[in-house]
Image (cartoon, helix red, strand yellow):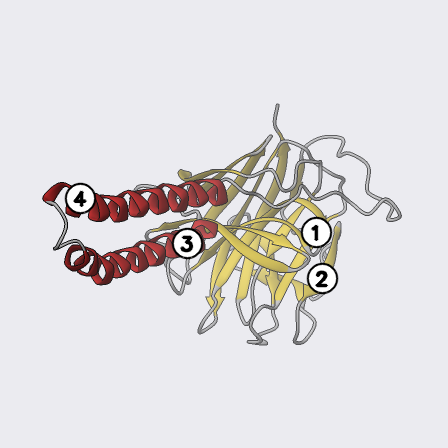
Amino acid sequence: MLPILNERRCFGPLTSFFVSGQVTLVTLAILAPLAVDHNAAHSQCEAMRYPRAFFAFAAVLGIVALALVVSSCGESPTPRVADPSVVQLPLAAGAVTNHFDTDVIDQAPIGFTVHTVGPGRPAQWLVKAASDAPSAGNVLMQCDNDDTNNRFPCVLSTAGRFANVRVEVKAKGISGNRDRSFGVIARAIDEKNYYVARCNTVNENIRLYRLIDGKRSELAEWEGSAAPGVWHSIALEVVGDQLTVFFNGKKVIEHHDGTFAHPGRVGLWTKAEAISQFDDFSATPLP
């Protein structure tokens, strides 16, 4: 299927545009007959002048509304920067990989910090043995099934910050009724501000989000086959303001956004009650 590049922030302005158009048409439907009746006693030329004025007025309203839509669709949030009072990690020295095979079973992964954003229980990111792991041995698993909505468990790498980067992982959705999801994070200022590309194997779609102060906004979506219970690969490339998402090696989303323009951390992500497994995590610097 072709990428679906949805500018969700345009829906509000578009709705306003169509609503204003409907109001204009209703106004014309009411006033135009009145104008014709009012001018019945005048000359034919004079009678035509008022309806033309109404239609000209409607055209002006339409042009103004369309201009507002275009300008609104082009708006982006103010670029986010790290709090200068918070010490940031240095730039990463190079590529980072983690197969979790040397980590201790039933312990948090080495080289990551564990976070839970939003309401609900703290997440449980634990290393587990898995016979079907893409690289034989262990996987990283988010084990808590708290189904509180807008709860975002994540882990962020401590390897450093990346500017242009490709973040990739193999992952599998294990369980979850509403959310059986997994994703990768890039350009993270902290656990509440970043880009994330995620797959939900319940709805079988891929979405690109940005989180600002822990609040998600959708940037783009792709719908296609994303079956639960099997291993997939998902990758997010960020180069300048261009964001590209790959799913099972196929490019599915391209989008531009300048909210997070500075180097940031990389990591892994789930949502709400999703229990998911991860393996073969990598972050590779790009030119």
**Is 100 or 163 nearer to us in this picture?**
163
Q: Is residue 242 left or right of residue 98?
A: left
User: Mark 1 is on which residue type?
Assistant: Leu
- Secondary structure at numbered mark 2: strand
The label shown at residue 249 is: none
The C terminus, quarter of image: top right
Sequence order check: which comes first, mark 4 or mark 1?
Answer: 4
Foreground: disc 3 or disc 1: 3
Q: Residues within 10 Å of mark 1 (few under 14, many from 20)?
A: many
Residue 264 place in picture, x, y as percent:
71, 41
Vertical arrangement, residue 45 with respect to residue 197, above or below: above
- Secondary structure at numbered mark 3: helix
Sequence order check: which comes first, mark 3 or mark 4?
Answer: 3
Foreground: disc 2 or disc 4: 4
- Which residue is under mark 3? 11
Vertical arrangement, residue 126 with respect to residue 39, above or below: below
Mark 1–mark 2 CB contact (< 8 Å): yes
Q: Residues within 10 Å of mark 2 (few under 14, many from 20)?
A: some
- Secondary structure at numbered mark 1: strand
Distance between the alpha carbons at the discs numbered 2 and 4: 73 Å
In the image, what residue occupies the spot 63% across and 42% down? Answer: 259
Distance between the alpha carbons at the discs numbered 4 and 1: 73 Å
In the image, what residue occupies the spot 71% across and 62% down? Answer: 115
Residue 232 seen in render:
no
User: Mark 4 is on which residue type?
Assistant: Glu
- Which residue is under mark 4? 46
- Which residue is under mark 1? 156
Distance between the alpha carbons at the discs numbered 3 and 4: 42 Å
**Is 232 or 90 nearer to us in this picture?**
90
Sequence order check: which comes first, mark 3 or mark 1?
Answer: 3
Vertical arrangement, residue 69 with respect to residue 203, above or below: above
